Amino acid sequence: MSTPKTDARTRLLDAGMQLLRERGYDATRVEDLCSAAGVTKGAFFHHFASKADYGVAAAQHWTNITAPMFAAADYHAAPTPLARIFAYLDLRRAMIAGAPAQFSCVAGTMAQEVFETQPAIRDACGVSIAGHAATLEADFAAAIAEHGLGDVVEAADLALHTQVVLQGGYVVAKALDDTAAVVASIDHLRRYLMLLFKQEEKLQ
């Protein structure tokens, strides 16, 4: 039995996951997306009312692709909340490979460009980034309670801070053309959390 052919809308969104990270939103033309997806411009505008409409859908598609991967990742099996947080950071560190277009975030890349000019895309990117941060909140909340830090920090703030570090690292890696900036930032975040939670084990 032959495998069903992916529909045009999905092919267009899949194509954007690479092109948007390589070129950014403004420099990614509808023609480029159509060529990469193997569809016509007519097909593009059948599925998306405009390029901006596509940008909103692309941010959601990014979440739809990445969320199941993180949900199934091994870091969830670590024995304690804090161990799961550190295992998550280890995973993010291991994902830094190749050029920024290979490991950076579609939502973060678009948000940097369109936060003033395309509010609908900006908001969709914000939902994507904050939504992923929210998946870490339960472990941060449990770790905070376990270590008696409820008067010091809030789980939602720490969870979002992980994404601030990652997104900032991606930007600096692009600016310096050096992925070491992201790796170093993740390592510094790990050290900060070790100090915050009074962990004495050495950084791996």
Image (cartoon, grey):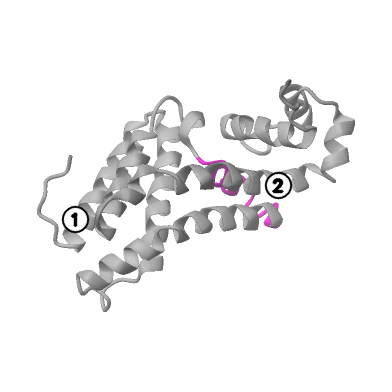
Q: Viewed as shown, does residue 194 lie left or right of 43? A: left
Q: Viewed as shown, does residue 111 lie left or right of 94? A: right
Pointer 1 residue? 194
Mostly what secondary structure, the magenta segment?
Answer: helix
Q: Give the range drawn in magenta.
A: 105-119
- On-image quarter of the N terminus: top right
- On-image quarter of the C terminus: top left
Q: Tell me the kind of residue under disc 2.
A: Ala
- Callout 1 crowding tier (Cα within 10 Å): few <14, some 14–19, many ≥20: some
The residue lying at 58 percent from left, 49 percent from top is 111
Q: Tell me the kind of residue under disc 1.
A: Met
Q: Nearer the viewer, residue 29 or 106?
A: 106
The residue lying at 26 percent from left, 79 percent from top is 151
> Image quarter for residue 11?
top right
| Residue 130 is a magenta residue | no
The residue lying at 31 percent from left, 53 percent from top is 85
Residue 90's x, y, as percent? 30, 42
SS of the residue under disc 1 = helix
Residue 70's x, y, as percent? 45, 46
Residue farthest toward the front in the current orientation of the protein = 1
Q: Viewed as shown, does residue 162 lie left or right of 127? A: left
Residue 165's x, y, as percent? 37, 50
Examine the rendered structure and indicate whether residue 30 appears above or below residue 193.
Answer: above
> Image quarter for residue 17?
top right
Residue farthest toward the bottom in the current orientation of the protein = 151
Pointer 2 residue? 57
Examine the rendered structure and indicate whether residue 197 appears above or below residue 27.
Answer: below
Q: Which mark is residue 20?
A: none
